[in-house]
Image (tube, rainbow, N blue to C red):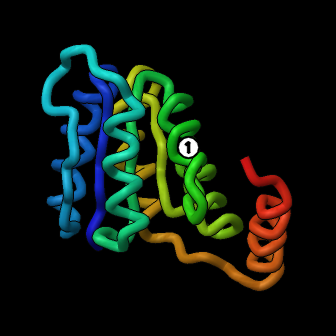
Amino acid sequence: MKVAIASDHAGYFLKEKVKDFLRRDGHEVVDVGCHAAVSVDYPEYGFKAIEKLLKKEVERAILICGTGIGMSIIANRFPGVRAALCLNPFLAKMARLHNDANVLVMGGRIIADGLAEEIVKTFLSTPFEGGRHQRRLELIESLAQKIKT
């Protein structure tokens, strides 16, 4: 699978570990930054990965900042993005099964390397269940159309 990955300075070291894991697991990685643990603005890097996803240049995206909260906020601002902040493999599984999440978000300051690998593996290998969950995703989209900002 082709995966975009991005982080800010607080997520940089975990991003590098996840990137290595993805490659070892046979995935193609598109690293859009940041490229050092020097202070940067997370929205810029989150946007770069989301842009790749929405242009269909990648199948999924992984975003990492200090807590994952900021990257979740920027990602979910865009139609068609379903970003899930996952703290464990169960949340990653449910994000895919029930919500067809296409963006995994993690906190570089709160997720250990080994746990991150399990979360990523689960997220990328779990299919969307569809059925009643598809109907709910369609409902979310129709409700979002009611409010134009």
- Residue 113, image quadrant: top left
Q: Could you tell me residue 129's position as x and y percent?
A: 67, 79
Say left or right for 144 vs 78: right
Q: Is residue 13 above or below residue 17?
A: above
Q: Where is residue 146 in the image (x, y as percent from the top left)?
A: 85, 60
- Residue 53 placement, left or right of 6: right
Q: Position of residue 134 (x, y in %)?
A: 74, 78
Q: Which residue lies furthest to the bottom in this view?
A: 131
Query: What's the amino acid at mark 1?
Result: Cys
Front residue (pair 75, 26) = 75
The residue indicated by pointer 1 is 86
> Residue, x 49% and y 24% (percent of image)?
67
| Residue beneath the point at 82% across and 53% down | 147
- What x and y, as percent, mark residue 102? 50, 63
Q: Residue at x 81, y 69 (%)?
A: 142
Residue 87 visible at all: no
Secondary structure found at label 1 = loop
